[in-house]
Amino acid sequence: MRPNGIRTHLLKLFYRLLYNEFAWTYNLVAWLVSFGQWKAWTRAIIPHIAARSDRILELASGPGHLLVSMSKQGLKPIGIDLSPAMCRLATRTLHTADVRVPIVRARAQALPFRNNSFGCSVATFPTEFILDPRTLREVDRVTYYTSEQQPTDNWRMGIVGWVRFGQHTIPSRFLNWLYHTTEQGEPSVAIGDDILRRAGFEYQVISSRVGHNDVMLILARQKKRDLPI
């Protein structure tokens, strides 16, 4: 096996363990690899969500922290995750925060919701599932367009993609190295450009300043459904 193949294999094993058998370590790992900024990074998408709709589907909602934040902002989110361990962790997070949000165990490629159920979907630092054409078709199916929405704002999927580290400090250099090593850093080309466009999506990448860093957000929409339903 080639070095890159070995690294990819090990990364897949790491993420599988982190999202399942070692899900109980997720919050600690996220805190360590972001120096405590992980939750703030994910919250950067909320203003764009609130401007779109209050009915939000979070894909791969993990430990549920963004669900709590969205709910406290007056939004109506629902979380889905394939991992039973993550669903349990999210349930505990919501209980601790005294917030009621539905958590559904499901695949993003086969969402158990009716057509036009949500104003938009969101995913934070997702793995490769987000670019599966089946996921993109499902996102388009379960999200809706309202006649009041301007076409230029008619995006249906928000992604917290990656972070640009703004300071040349030792912690920032370490995080930059770590994220590139784990293939979570800034992509050399726009994320999944060919896949998104083949699925009929167009998108824009914007930045949101969080502390000394820029959180890069991807807002995507389906070009084929720009007319009111």
Image (tube, rainbow, N blue to C red):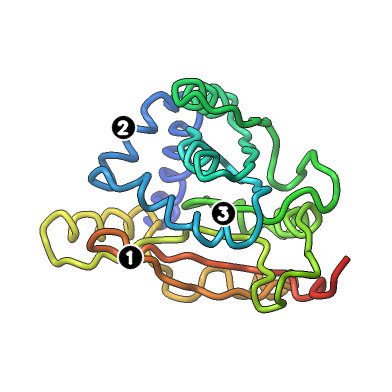
Relative depth, front residue between 183 and 137: 137
For the residue labelled by badge 2, is the local secondary structure a helix, a strand or a loop? helix
User: How busy is the neighbourhood of tag 3: few (under 14 within 10 Å), some, or many (20 plus)?
Assistant: few
Name the disc covering residue 124, or none.
none
The answer for how far apart the CA atoms under marks 1 and 2 are is: 24 Å
How crowded pointer 1 is (Cα within 10 Å; few <14, some 14-19, many 20+) is rated as some
* Residue, far bottom: 152
Q: Disc 1, disc 3: CB below 8 Å? A: no
Marks 1 and 3, how far apart at CA: 25 Å
Provide the secondary structure element on which disc 1 rests.
strand
Within 10 Å of disc 2 (Cα), the crowding (few <14, some 14-19, many 20+) is few
Q: Is residue 147 above or below residue 106?
A: below
- Near-viewer residue (100 or 79): 100
Give whichever of discs 1 and 2 has the lower sequence position: 2
- Residue at point 85% right, 51% down? 115
- Decide: is 60 above or below 161: above
- 100 versus 43 height, above or below: above
Amino acid type for the residue under numbered disc 3: Glu
On the image, the x and y values in percent for residue 25 come to 36, 27
For label 1, the residue is 209
Q: Nearer the viewer, mark 1 or mark 3?
A: 1
Residue highlighted by disc 3: 128
The residue tagged with tag 3: helix, strand or loop?
Answer: helix
Residue 198, position as x, y percentages in the image: 72, 74
Residue receiving disc 2: 28
Q: Earlier in the sequence, mark 1 or mark 3?
A: 3
In the image: residue 3, left or right of residue 49: left
**What residue is shown at x 58% (from left), y 42% (from top)?**
60
Amino acid at the residue labelled 2: Leu
The residues tagged by marks 2 and 3 sit, at their Cα atoms, a distance apart of 23 Å
